[in-house]
């Protein structure tokens, strides 16, 4: 199919049309009567979002450890919101008893609030078959009558007494008792489910929908609650049920002790029942829970088991037919599949220790501020123009083809973000920058290969075919190792780490499609139009042509430079520590209300001047209300004194807006956005991604190549951290995103060189290994430098036009690109030489090349 040029253009047209549809659809879905939608969902730092203030709801159950329950709730909420699909939310404690949740790009606020508030406490209980309610209803009614509560007019059931039918009336005493029950409010309102035509279930009763709240209120009065049958609990169904023309609420008398709870649940998946097409949740228990569930259900075969979620019975209790172990399901009646999915994700995240109530709900503005966003857009436009000029000036008409492919790449990337409803934030843009670098890199690899083939005297058509063929392994290997890293970042990371990973994965696949398929299609069309071409417009100037630098021999100088940076960085870290931002340390939150509207940019600049570096400022509802977050210890003598920090902020605000022109609504301590658990997950993601890269390269190359790539990448991360410590840059989530980008660039550069080394090992069997390494680095030097220069152009623009908020990001990334280029030349290849010499291959081409190095070890040091 793809050998036909017409079919290839049809596929490209489909990709463009599909991309346009997804972008338009996202704009349509996010547009409201008061808000213009966007083609891609933007994060809190770019557009603001929904702010929720949550506190423990202790109206029904008093918490014995409020502080501990708040911390547990924080962990549960993070898991839920990550699964809910909101990328890069803000979830942090404020004060001792409040949690703040800020959600970007939420189009269904009611659904989001339901997911946040649901307790998700799951229980399984056996329905009562001893008629305990019937035996107690008389004394409860007499108690209510003594309290002055009687059956209301019209509340008498249609039958003389449904309860009387159950108990019978074969004695004077029972008749007297029934007479009292008949006149009681519970006897008037509570009936067995069979009385309205429902199949009888032990312990199941019905109450008219209009009266069930009254009955529930009376049942829970302390005077009545003391009269409940021993060992029996009462629960209502989660939804009314129709019987005839009326609606009833089901009331269940259940064993007080659950046979098992959701604490043993390990997985829950929503699906549709293939027979009824009704939504349901299939759940799985752990081994211990499965054993206990199996023992209890085997003991209760023939009994009815109620499934209770958040104190409501889910559907009518099924009869236990046989022993049930680890697998089960919760049928949700007439509820939608989306509701089932929300229930499944809350069950997987775990139950809240105490229910939460929403005490504050507002819209908040972007945390970056209009100045930072405007500067980022300008920098992005200038960066794109720089890339276009570089590609056209260096590769002539072939560069124009590459630009056309890059435009399609950008369209596809944003369309994929829209299709997956992903949220784009500044860390996500970091992933996009890296993916653009890789897209440019793939075209550069292809063009340089075409140039090499043309230089060997091959025809234009053969040079194009061979260029794509020879560049393909390096493109695939470098992109797939990046995807492997990003997958682990997404799996173990959260918040900005996941946002970075999602954007990077989408960008990498889009770049591979455009470089391998779209660019080649454009070349094929060009060649078809001009089949008699004897030369190809692929640029006349070639940097580093016939380069023959002795990189490996000079590796010791590189070691000295990198060791010096690492040593100085280690000293700086020991002496001063890492300068973490408020996102990592927590700090002080102040809710400020100015008498007149003021811009976020003016406030941020004023606070910076007063010594509050890295302050986070967001509009909070109205244009004259703000939330200001500053780091622990900024401008205070006591890092833990929130009031002192608040006073320092107020003093700074007085200088900015004037005394009496603002009021402080509240001042509270605020916890970190990135807790210890999330930091641990980020380190785990990087750690496991290294193993994945090592395994992949061991499969595609040799384990020695994989180990050398991992060591070189670890070196680059270490040196970048040392650079951050030396400049005392503030480590924010944005800087973390830059660090992850350096990781990707470093791997990409190293893999490209290693791929050329592997090729030369195959084609130049008699060459000394050191000479072979030098040749491989020199041959890839044009690609290494050009890719770095195009990316650096964007970052220079970002440094010039960006604000203090995003300047650290561009500075770290600028250094990281220089380092990745340096490392791939002076670190990765020499490390491979050392590893190959230390543990030489047993046989093959590489073994013979290494043996030639070992034979001249005295002349050529390998350290």
Image (tube, rainbow, N blue to C red):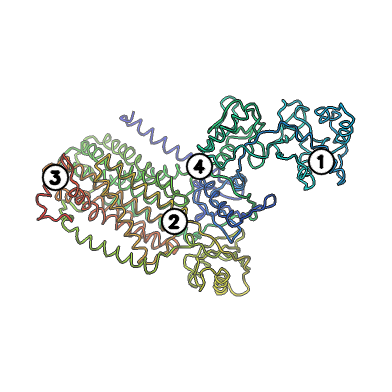
Relative to residue 785, is residue 92 drawn left or right? right
Q: Between 171 and 328, which is closer to the camera in this rendering?
A: 171
Query: What residue is drawn where x is 78% and y is 47%?
Result: 221
Q: Is residue 736 visible?
A: yes
Whichever of labels 2 and 4 marks the residue nearer the N terminus, that label is 4
Q: Given contact means CB atoms under 8 Å apart, are the residues at marks 1 and 3 in contact?
A: no
Q: Nearer the viewer, mark 1 or mark 3?
A: 1
Q: Secondary structure at mark 2?
A: helix
Q: Quadrant of the C terminus?
A: bottom left
Q: Nearer the viewer, residue 831 or 426?
A: 831
Return the residue at label 2: 377
Residue ID for mark 1: 140
Image position of 234 (left or right of 16):
right
Q: Are marks 2 and 1 in contact (CB under 8 Å)?
A: no
User: Could you classify mark 2 by the number of other residues whose Cα lies within 10 Å: few (under 14), some (14-19), or many (20 or more)?
Assistant: some
Question: Real-space Cα distance between discs 3 and 2?
Answer: 51 Å
- The disc, 3 or 2, on the residue closer to the chain's N-terminal end is 2
Question: Mark 3 touching mark 4, by CB under 8 A?
Answer: no
Q: Closer to the N terminus: mark 3 or mark 4?
A: 4
Q: Is residue 537 visible?
A: no
Mark 3 or 4, closer to the camera: 3
User: Dot 4 corresponds to which residue?
Assistant: 24
């Amino acid at each position: 199919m793809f050998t036909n040029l017409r079919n290839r253009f049809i596929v490209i047209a489909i990709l463009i049309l599909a991309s346009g549809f997804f972008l338009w659809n996202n704009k349509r879905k996010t547009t409201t009567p008061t808000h213009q939608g966007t083609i891609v969902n933007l994060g809190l730092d770019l557009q603001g979002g929904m702010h929720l203030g949550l506190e423990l709801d202790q109206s029904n159950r008093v918490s014995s450890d409020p502080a501990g329950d708040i911390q547990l709730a924080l962990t549960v909420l993070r898991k839920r919101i990550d699964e809910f699909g909101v990328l890069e939310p803000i979830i942090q404690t404020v004060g001792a008893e409040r949690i703040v949740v800020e959600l970007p790009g939420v189009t269904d606020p009611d659904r989001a609030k339901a997911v946040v508030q649901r307790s998700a406490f799951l229980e399984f209980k056996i329905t009562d078959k001893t008629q305990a309610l019937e035996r107690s209803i008389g004394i409860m009614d007499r108690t209510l009558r003594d309290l002055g509560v009687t059956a209301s007019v019209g509340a008498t059931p249609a039958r003389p007494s449904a309860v009387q039918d159950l108990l019978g009336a074969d004695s004077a005493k029972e008749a007297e008792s029934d007479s009292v029950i008949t006149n009681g409010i519970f006897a008037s309102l509570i009936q067995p489910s069979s009385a309205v035509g429902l199949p009888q279930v032990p312990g199941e009763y019905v109450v008219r929908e209009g009266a069930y709240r009254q009955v529930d209120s009376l049942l829970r009065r302390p005077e009545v609650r003391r009269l409940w049958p021993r060992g029996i609990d009462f629960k209502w169904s989660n939804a009314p049920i129709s019987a005839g023309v009326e609606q009833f609420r089901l009331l269940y008398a259940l064993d007080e002790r659950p046979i098992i709870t959701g604490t043993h649940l390990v997985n829950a998946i929503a699906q549709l029942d293939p027979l009824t097409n009704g939504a349901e949740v299939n759940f799985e228990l752990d081994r211990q829970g499965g054993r206990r569930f199996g023992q209890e259900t085997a003991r209760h075969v023939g009994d009815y088991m109620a499934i209770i979620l958040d104190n409501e019975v889910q559907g009518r209790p099924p009869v236990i037919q046989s022993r049930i172990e680890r697998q089960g399901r919760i049928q949700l009646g007439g509820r939608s599949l989306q509701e089932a999915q929300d229930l499944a994700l809350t069950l997987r995240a775990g139950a809240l220790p105490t229910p939460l109530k929403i005490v504050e709900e507002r819209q908040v503005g972007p945390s970056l501020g209009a100045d930072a966003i405007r500067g980022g857009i300008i920098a992005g436009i200038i960066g794109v123009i720089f890339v276009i000029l570089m590609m056209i000036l260096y590769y002539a008409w072939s560069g124009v083809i590459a630009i056309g492919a890059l435009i399609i790449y950008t369209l596809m990337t944003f369309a994929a973000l829209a299709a997956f409803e992903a949220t784009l934030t500044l860390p996500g843009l970091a992933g996009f920058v890296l993916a653009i670098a890789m897209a440019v890199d793939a075209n550069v690899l292809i063009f340089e290969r075409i140039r090499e083939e043309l230089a060997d005297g091959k025809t234009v058509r053969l040079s194009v075919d061979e260029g794509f063929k020879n560049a393909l392994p390096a493109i695939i290997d470098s992109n797939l190792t990046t995807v492997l890293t990003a997958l682990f970042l997404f799996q173990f990371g959260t918040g900005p780490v996941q946002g970075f990973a999602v954007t990077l994965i989408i960008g990498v696949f889009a770049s591979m499609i455009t470089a391998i398929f779209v660019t080649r299609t454009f070349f094929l069309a060009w060649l078809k139009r001009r089949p008699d071409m004897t030369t190809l417009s692929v640029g006349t100037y070639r940097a580093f042509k016939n380069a023959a630098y002795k990189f490996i021999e000079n590796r010791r100088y590189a070691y000295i430079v990198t060791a010096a940076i690492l040593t100085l960085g280690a000293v700086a870290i020991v002496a001063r520590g890492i300068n973490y931002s408020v996102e990592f340390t927590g700090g002080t939150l102040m809710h400020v209300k100015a008498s007149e509207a003021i811009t976020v940019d003016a406030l941020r600049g004023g606070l910076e001047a007063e010594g509050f570096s890295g302050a986070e400022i967001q509009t909070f509802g109205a244009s004259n209300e703000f939330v200001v977050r500053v780091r622990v210890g900024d401008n205070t003598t006591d890092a833990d004194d929130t009031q002192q920090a608040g006073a320092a902020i107020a003093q700074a605000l007085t200088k900015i807006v004037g005394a009496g022109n603002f009021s402080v609504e509240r001042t509270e301590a605020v916890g970190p956005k990135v807790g210890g658990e999330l930091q641990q997950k980020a380190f785990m993601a990087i750690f496991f991604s290294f193993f994945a890269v090592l395994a992949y390269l061991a499969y595609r190359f040799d384990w020695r190549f994989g180990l050398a790539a991992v060591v070189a990448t670890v070196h680059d991360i270490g040196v970048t951290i040392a650079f951050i410590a030396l400049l005392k840059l503030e480590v924010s989530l944005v800087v973390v995103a830059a660090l992850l980008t350096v990781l990707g660039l470093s791997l990409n550069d190293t893999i490209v060189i290693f791929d050329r080394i592997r090729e030369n090992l195959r084609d130049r069997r008699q060459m000394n290994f050191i000479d072979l390494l030098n040749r491989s680095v020199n041959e890839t030097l044009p690609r290494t430098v050009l890719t770095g220069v195009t990316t650096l152009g964007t970052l220079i623009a970002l440094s010039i036009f960006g604000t203090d908020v995003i300047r650290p990001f561009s500075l770290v990334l600028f250094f990281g690109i220089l380092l990745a280029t340096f490392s791939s030349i002076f670190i990765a290849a020499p490390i491979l030489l050392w590893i190959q010499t230390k543990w030489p291959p047993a046989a093959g081409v590489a073994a013979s090349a290494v043996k030639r190095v070992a034979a001249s070890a005295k002349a050529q040091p390998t350290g």
